[in-house]
Amino acid sequence: MRFGRKELFASAVGLVLALVCALDAAKVNKHKPWIETTYHGIVTENDDKVLLDPPLIALDKDAPLRYAESFEVTLTEEGEICGFRIHGQNVPFEAVVLDKSSGEGIIRAKEKLDCEMQKEHTFTIQAYDCGEGPDGANMKKSHKATVHIQVNDLNEYSPVFKEKSYKATVIEGKKYDSILKVEAVDADCSFQFSQICNYEIVTPDVPFTIDKDGFIKNTEKLNHGREHMYKLTVTAYDCGKNRASEDVLVKISIKPTCKPSWQGFNKRIEYEPGTGSLALFPGMHLETCDEPITSIRATIELETNHIGKGCDRDTYSEKSLHKLCGASSGTMELLPAPSSSANWTVGLPTDNGHDSDQVFEFNGTQAVKVPDGLVSTSLKELFTISVWMRHGPGAHEKETILCNSDKTDMNRHHYSLYVHNCRLILLLRQEPSEMENYKPAEFHWKLEQVCDKEWHHYVLNVEFPTVTLFVDGSTFEPFLVTEDYPLHASRIESQLTIGACWQGGNARMAQFFRGNLAGLMIRAGKLENKKVIDCLYTCKEGLDVQLPEEVASTVKVEFNPNQSSLTVEGDDIDAFDKVMQHISYLNSRQFPTPGIRHLRISTTVKCFNEESCVTMPDVEGYVMVLQPEEPKISLSGIDHFARSAAEFESQEGVTLFPELRIVSTITREVEVDPESVATEGADDDPTVQETVVSEEIMHNLDTCEVNVVGDELDAEHEGLEVDMDELQQRSLEMSSSHLGLVITGVNTMANYEQVLHLIRYKNWHTDVLFDRKFKLVCSELNGRYISNDFKVEVNVIHTAGTMEQLSNALVQPNFINPVHQASVDLSGHNLVNAHQASVVPSAATIVIVVCVSFLVFMIILGVFRIRAAHQRTMRDQENGKENEMDWDDSALTITVNPMETYEDQHSSEEEEEEEEESEEGEEEDDITSAESESSEDDEGGDQEDRQGASRQQQLEWDDSTLTY
């Protein structure tokens, strides 16, 4: 069937109209957009793109089908997705539509994300379409979908250790599974980057290792002696291989194996003399290693056996010490220090020093005889023998300390003190009597002290038939007493010896002693009491303790007699430590003996089972007593004066030391402030930090000795005297000899001054005496400190009555010099007594004055003549320069005879006028010397002849050096 064009056109229009109607019906927005219900996304911090699963796509049924080939979706807006809306508070994300027609979109971060701040984000999202028409009416929204977004971490942080440093203490000799743990943290938020995967010890060659968890352990046993502390540097790595920003220091201390002992003990302790008591253990405490302690006992010993006679004591003579301790008179010292008045000990070896006591050594071949009459001890009366002795195990022979035996013919021992087989034996034979009965004769004591090589003090109080022995202040009874008949009557004198026994029948010594002795004394008529004995034995140094009140009731302290040892007992460790910290050393001597005193602490600890559960090692150290400041004893006063002969012959005599002054000083080094030194003197050396100052001190003296210088004293016409009453009031003693006198006894310097002021010199025959010289020396501590030698010269002024004797004496050559010297020095001496000024000058004085005047005049005359001769020589030298062809005598020494030149000029004058006018002539020569030099140029050859003649005269002889 064929249609025409009109039919075809009409059909096409109808189709178009039908299509338009269909499209108008399709523009109606009937459906909501559709999205997934849940989305999961991942975003990396510092990035904004989020990867979603599933992708963000919104679907709308109003949208045209894509697969319609002839479908143009751009013709309508219904079904297109215009956007996404995010719901939530402070959501750092936004959703963006990439394609409206497909509904595809993305979620992205609006700002920089930080995983460490927030690792996950959750919010809701909703899609909406574009609605109907251009104005978007009837817009449809999808349901809300939940979005979970995780922020992925970056490894931006490094590990940081929790502590700035780590410390640990381990005990030596042990391997540990773990010593300590170090720990580091990482601020990253992810597991990978926030975890510490490895630790490392950076310090090389150390016996330690560390695991991945930070535990440090030792790889070998540690030794405190080799290393006290190890310092390790440790670092850490996270799982992203980032190293710690700062390494950490680990200190591991190696503690010695815990051994119960005293801790905090100083081995060397210095003691400065004169500072009182010094705490020995101020910081010491007892380490028991946590053992259950029930009781503690400690013994502290101060070893002073090498100091003096067992410890530091005053080193005065034994006789002086007895007086200081209260013993009455009658004590005779048998081993005194060698001196002019006690010389029988000169040959014995001594300790060679004055810092401590002087002791005598007996080597088995030496002994001394005591002078006759020194000891007058009758065995019928009370007497005491005291001695210091140090003796070791010897041979099985008798060793005699003191022996009184027959001097000749026989070998009988009247009494003796000797050692035999570590026994001390006193032999005491009774004198002849009417009763020939047995009586106690030998007293035996068996003592360990006799053979222990230590110093001990022995005192025997003899009250026959009883003998009491004190050893170091303790009483001992004899274990054996044997009897014997009294001695037979005899007229043989006895000999007292020390160190051996004299055999009168053989005329030799026997039974020699081997050891050391000191302070051997015999006191007749009285017994020593216990107080004096304890005083003699007491040391001047020892241990002391002041118990704190809070521990006095819980700790017990006991001393030995000389305080060289003490014992502390207690059960409380803290209280025990406090007592030990208050133990001190004390030396009360003004000038102690310097040197080492050894210390030892022995400790016993018991536990609950009443046994010694802990072994405490002994602690050893020493106290170093420093050298004391040595005093300088100075004697001063009038050392040269004159007195009339009548005073020497008077009853009072002449006082030798009227203005004597005794002063003792010590020199100290004082630190100076450098600032004050710089202020006072800028030119001084700034390195000088110390200055020396002298300080006067007071102490005692024990001896002053006055000796005559020159000829010994002749007892027939001269002597030295002192007021004995004054000596006794001051407990001083005096002994005299042909050499002078010695004053002994411990007393102050002031008392010695007063006594020395009273010493007088007398001479009953001063006819030929012109002067006498004396020397005074004082000392302290048995010669340890000695003064200067103070010498005094006394001149005798004779009266006119002795003119004839003096004239005869002056003729003798051996008296000319002393008289001449005394006359010269006399004008400068102090004549103490005023009445001496009225003494009539003697002939000797007139002669001396004339001689001195003449000597001075001749000296002045010689000086002027030498000066004139020197000026003439200078003129000759000036004139000689004009003629260089003459011989050169400039290097010669021209010796002038002024007397001969003077005689040539004034030969016609008399000798007396010549001496007076010579002085004026020389002065004129001095004044006109310049004029004479100018006039010599005009004289020509005549002057040269006169020069030759003058030179010939001047070279003849030289008396310029003669003494007129």
Image (tube, rainbow, N blue to C red):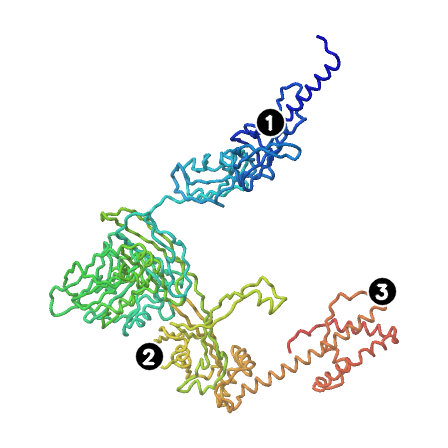
Percent coordinates x, y for residue 282 in the rendering: 38, 58
Q: Earlier in the sequence, mark 1 or mark 3?
A: 1
Please state which amino acid type lies under the numbered disc 2: Gln
Q: Camera-side residue: 41 or 125?
A: 125
Task: Characterize the local packing of mark 2: few (<14), some (14-19) or many (20 or more) Cα atoms within 10 angstroms.
Answer: few
| Left or right, residue 198 beside residue 360 | right
State which quarter of the image contains the C terminus: bottom right
267 w.r.t. 37: above or below: below
Q: Are marks 1 and 2 in contact (CB under 8 Å)?
A: no
SS at badge 1: loop
Q: Camera-side residue: 955 or 603?
A: 603
688 w.r.t. 733: above or below: above
**Front position among marks 3 and 2:** 2
Percent coordinates x, y for residue 789 in the rendering: 47, 72
Q: Residue 691 lies in what quarter of the image?
A: bottom right
| Left or right, residue 642 beside residue 334 | right
State which quarter of the image contains the N terminus: top right
The residue that label 2 is drawn on is: 728
**Front position among marks 1 and 2:** 1
Q: Earlier in the sequence, mark 1 or mark 2?
A: 1
Please state which amino acid type lies under the numbered disc 1: Asp
SS at badge 2: helix
Please state which amino acid type lies under the numbered disc 3: Met
The residue that label 1 is drawn on is: 62
Q: Earlier in the sequence, mark 3 or mark 2?
A: 2
- In three-dimensional space, the C-alpha distance between marks 1 and 2, rounded to whole angstroms, equals 150 Å
**Front position among marks 1 and 3:** 1
- In three-dimensional space, the C-alpha distance between marks 1 and 3, rounded to whole angstroms, equals 158 Å
The residue that label 3 is drawn on is: 885
- In three-dimensional space, the C-alpha distance between marks 3 and 2, rounded to whole angstroms, equals 93 Å
Q: Are marks 3 and 2 in contact (CB under 8 Å)?
A: no
Q: Residue 717 lies in what quarter of the image?
A: bottom left
